[in-house]
Image: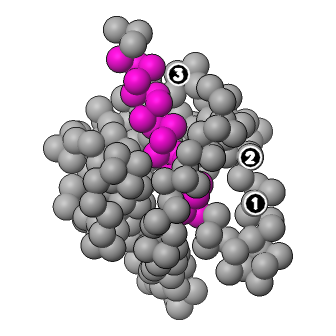
Amino acid sequence: MDLLQLMQKARTLLATHWVLSIGVCFVYSLVVAVPAELNSYGEMLSFLLAGPLQLGLCFFFLNLVRGEETRFELLFKGFKPLLTVLLCYAIIAALTIVGLILLIVPGIIVALGFSMTYYIIADDPEITFQVALEQSWKLTDGYKMELWVLNLRFIPWYILGLLCLIVGVFAVIPWHNTTLALYYEHLKEQQLSSI
């Protein structure tokens, strides 16, 4: 797949949604980061909020790429399948950490393999956490390296965003998320065509 073209398409889709998307990503970052800075209980609160809010981002950016209504409230829609999301978040975090301890590469593979889990839950909020994780692993089978390269392409943009008084990062995050949502749609098409 032409990853640069995918990134360009994401920018085009964001053209009329930049301000709202930046606002959603800023609130996500604020809500997840601030409690962790307060005390040890804040770290637990951040952990509990991160998964549902990550799912909320997936709802928002899937709606954006599908031409559906994008609303700020979608960020909080991830709290409805709460147990599923918390279990997925805990399992992905634990396996990624274990993988990173085992020479880094296994952790990256695990993170990439489960990276589509929240999009899958957004498409089917009734899904169990086991099935969501399994489907993500199957969906990314044979595409992990391409997905890795896609994520790497955003690193220079994040660095540039940091150089712009950190504010620029909040313009890159929506672009990155939109591109990942488009990539998820691409993976689903590939899966359907192989059946």
Picture coordinates of residue 81, whole percent (x, y): 21, 55
Residue occupying image coordinates x 74% and y 46%: 153
Residue at which label 3 appears: 141
Question: Which three-letter amino acid code belongs to the residue tagged 3?
Answer: Asp
Q: Which of marks 1 and 3 is nearer the N terminus?
A: 3
Check disc 1: other Cα within 10 Å, few if <14, some if 14-19, many if 20+: some
Which numbered circle lies on residue 124? none
- In the image, residue 75 above or below residue 61: below
Q: Which mark is residue 153?
A: 2
Instruction: Assess disc 2: are there few (<14), some (14-19) or many (≥20) residues with their C-alpha within 10 Å of its C-alpha.
Output: some
The amino acid sitting under disc 1 is Trp
The spot of residue 168 in percent (x, y) is 70, 74
User: Label 2 amino acid?
Assistant: Arg
Q: Position of residue 122 (x, y in %)?
A: 29, 48
Question: Farthest left residue?
Answer: 126
Q: Which sits in the foreground, 2 or 176?
A: 2
Task: Indicate left or right for 67 with 126 as reference.
Answer: right
Residue 179 placement, left or right of 165: left
- The answer to whether the residue labelled 2 contacts the one labelled 1, judged by CB atoms less than 8 Å apart, is yes
As drawn, the residue found furthest toward the bottom would be: 38
Single out the mark in the foreground, 3 or 2. 2
Point out residue 119 in the picture as x, y percentages from the top left corner: 37, 45
Q: At x 77% / y 84%, what residue is drawn?
A: 165
* Residue 180 seen: yes
Q: Is mark 3 on a helix, strand or loop?
A: loop
Q: What stretch is highlighted in magenta?
A: 173-192
